[in-house]
Amino acid sequence: SPIFCTCWSADNDAILYCTGKYLVVKPLSPNAKQNSWKAHDQIILKCDWNTVNNLILSGGEDCRYKVWDIVGRPLYASQAFEYPITSLAWAPDGSNFAVGSYNTIRLCDSAGWCHSVEKPKDGSVFGLSWS
């Protein structure tokens, strides 16, 4: 399966990537075992790993975003929205994250709850970053 997104761990000793419906945490140490889990019901398009709170964020074609701990335990799963999740990004301090889809940007807290929605009417949001 293709890999759509990759992220480094806080201490740069592991990499997170999404392939198909799975998230994979792959340690760089040759003797360490990788951890993978089925995270979504359809292809995962985006993932992000926050370096402060060590939480993982994922979103994809099942129109949901989810928050995970590093061993794959689900902490939050959004409702299914109308369109696939095409972008997401943690705030550098780990307190919030943003999620983008077709004509929509959501601002959420680290627990996953949405606090603000913008409707830019520009099509799919393919990239988000924090200043």
Image (cartoon, grey):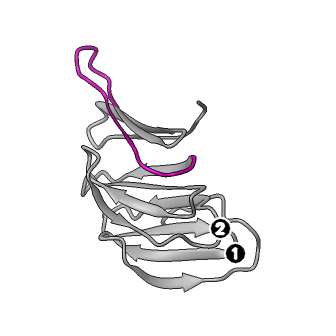
Query: Does residue 1 appear left or right of residue 47 in this picture?
Result: right
Q: Give the range drawn in magenta.
A: 26-43
Q: In this view, does 124 lie to the left or right of 46?
A: right
Q: Give the x, y percent position of residue 70.
A: 26, 46
Specify the label residue 83 is tagged with: 2
Q: Which residue is drawn at 69% across and 75% down?
A: 103
Image mark for residue 30: none
Residue 87 lies in the magenta stretch: no
Q: In which quarter of the image is the N terminus?
A: top right
Give the structural element (helix, strand or loop) at label 2. Answer: loop
Look at mark 1 in the image and give the residue it sits on.
103
Residue shown at 52% from the left, 76% from the top? 106
Q: Where is residue 10 in the image (x, y as percent from the top left)?
A: 29, 44
Rendered location of residue 87, percent (x, y): 57, 59
Rendered position, 118 above or below 128: below
Q: Residues within 10 Å of mark 1 (few under 14, many from 20)?
A: some
Q: Which of 19 and 115 is in front in this view?
A: 19
Name the dominant secondary structure of the magenta segment: loop
Up-down: is 9 above or below 98? above
Mark 2: few/some/many CA within 10 Å (<14, 14-19, 20+): some
Q: In which quarter of the image is residue 76?
A: bottom left
State yes or no: discs 1 and 2 in contact (Cβ < 8 Å). Answer: yes
> What element does badge 1 sit on?
loop
- Where residue 56 appears, as percent x and y from the top left, is 35, 52
Kindly give the residue lying farthest to the right in the view shown.
Answer: 122
Q: Distance between the residues labelled 1 and 2?
A: 9 Å
Residue 36 drawn in magenta: yes
Q: Is 120 drawn above or below residue 93 in the view shown?
A: below
User: Is residue 7 rendered to the left or right of residue 63?
Assistant: left
Residue nearest the viewer, comparing 82 with 2: 82
